[in-house]
Image (cartoon, rainbow, N blue to C red):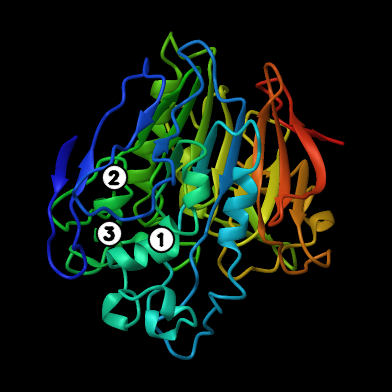
Amino acid sequence: MRRLSTPDGPQFPTTVCQLRVPPTASNAVLQQSTVQAATVHPSNRELPLPKWTGTTRPATIGVIGDTGCSLPAKATDPAQKCSTEWPFGQVAASLAKETKLDLVIHTGDYLYREDPSRADDKAKNPGCQTASDAASWDCVVADFFRPAETLLAKAPVALTRGNHEGCNPSLHDGAGGAWFRYLADELRNDRSCSRFTDPAFIRAGTLNLVNVDSSLADPDDDGGTANQGIFTGYFNAVNQDAGRQQHMNQDYFVFTHKPLWMVKSAAPMPTVATHVLDAAVADTHLGRLRDNVRLALSGHIHLYQMLDFNTHRPPQLTVGSSGGPLDNGPNDSKVMGMAIGTPPQPVNQSITQEQSPPGGIGIFGYADLTDGGGTWSAAFHERNGTVKGQTCTLSTDLTHKSFTCH
């Protein structure tokens, strides 16, 4: 293995090593060592490898997002009870039980323990108990690696950065520094954090995943469009890659933390997230995403929502209900027919999973995407794995992308 970083202060008391496993490998096992290692690996030390080849693609993809236990630094903001109200461990275990799970996509937001002193599960987390411990290795274990252990043992994961992994003013340490040390596509050893990172293109056989970092898109969630040019460059890169001769007949999924077209509220006017990303797509050379971009996957809003337009625009699947406190959703019947985005397009279908529709609070859970032999089906699962609502199949028509639900 190649050593990436060595212990560096109280936040990062770890050595991080990496090994790139060739696609031809049949298995990967962590061998016993005299070096003391964190016990967040599978008990049998066997690591999951891709099941697809260069000519196939993942058959079942799990989607989770916004998974951390919310302990805000501001004392007046409510703290989540990590021991009883935080379902991420159960969500991860339920998803891991899916027998054909090939890949997991995380839509961002992992590190919610801004003030660990407010936690009610401190006894389990000796190094994550005070405000000064926030975003330390022990808090990364508490918020992500430990509750996700069964899932990480089951399938490879693709991660995008959320706004909770943003940079602090010094561009060093903090949650952003932890992201780049432990979770980013390219890990770092210098405690640094970058506000923006270029898209990462992940080849899952014949399925192309594009990780677009939207952690700093509209940071105040007020409809701002600052940095639009940066995101336009990102989406131009997506279109350029999707338009290459060898990729034109392959599916692309863009996964990014903040949604491009998700509707948070329907009345009296639709509240749409996130204007800067929508405007950036519209400002690309093509004026939209290429037709083989089949789906946009996001989180940030703590709900499950599936939105389509029956046009060239890809459907938006928002999965932000896997751990953090839930949001209220819109009245779907009022969302359908609303013209949103740039240029405005009427919503053809809106399906939000809520405890008491219409407009009620969301439901904890995850989504899965299943390859049905040429197209994809999507379903929402509650935290215990039970399917909630209808299973929806994505059309094969690339100019009229919509879901048919049953």
Q: Position of residue 84 (x, y in %)?
A: 61, 75
**Looking at the image, is mark 2 or mark 3 nearer the viewer?**
3
> Would you name the residue on which mark 3 appears?
178
Q: From this view, report whether residue 16 is shown above or below residue 265.
A: above
Amino acid type of disc 3? Ala
Secondary structure type for disc 2:
loop
Task: Give the residue displayed 28% in from the left and 42% down from the top.
Answer: 32
Between label 3 and label 1, give the one nearer the viewer: 3
Instruction: State whether residue 76 is above or below residue 339.
Output: below
Instruction: Give the SS element for disc 1.
Output: helix
Can residue 29 be seen in the rendering of this structure? yes
Please identify the quadrant where the C terminus is shown: top right
| Mark nearer the N terminus (2 vs 1) | 1
Label 3 to label 1: alpha-carbon separation = 13 Å
Q: Position of residue 279 (x, y in %)?
A: 48, 46
Badge number at residue 197: 2
User: Mark 1: which amino acid?
Assistant: Asn
Q: At numbered mark 3, what does the secondary structure look like: helix, strand or loop?
A: helix
Instruction: Tell me which amino acid carries mark 2.
Output: Thr
78 with respect to 350 (left or right): left
Q: Which residue is mark 1?
A: 163
Residue 188 percent location from the top left of the image:
19, 48
Q: CA distance from mark 2 to mark 1?
A: 13 Å
Q: Compute the Cα span from label 2 to label 3.
A: 15 Å
Give the side of residue 201 with respect to residue 82, left or right: left
Is residue 88 found left or right of 306 in the rendered image? left
Query: Residue sitting at 79 percent across and 38 percent down?
Result: 391
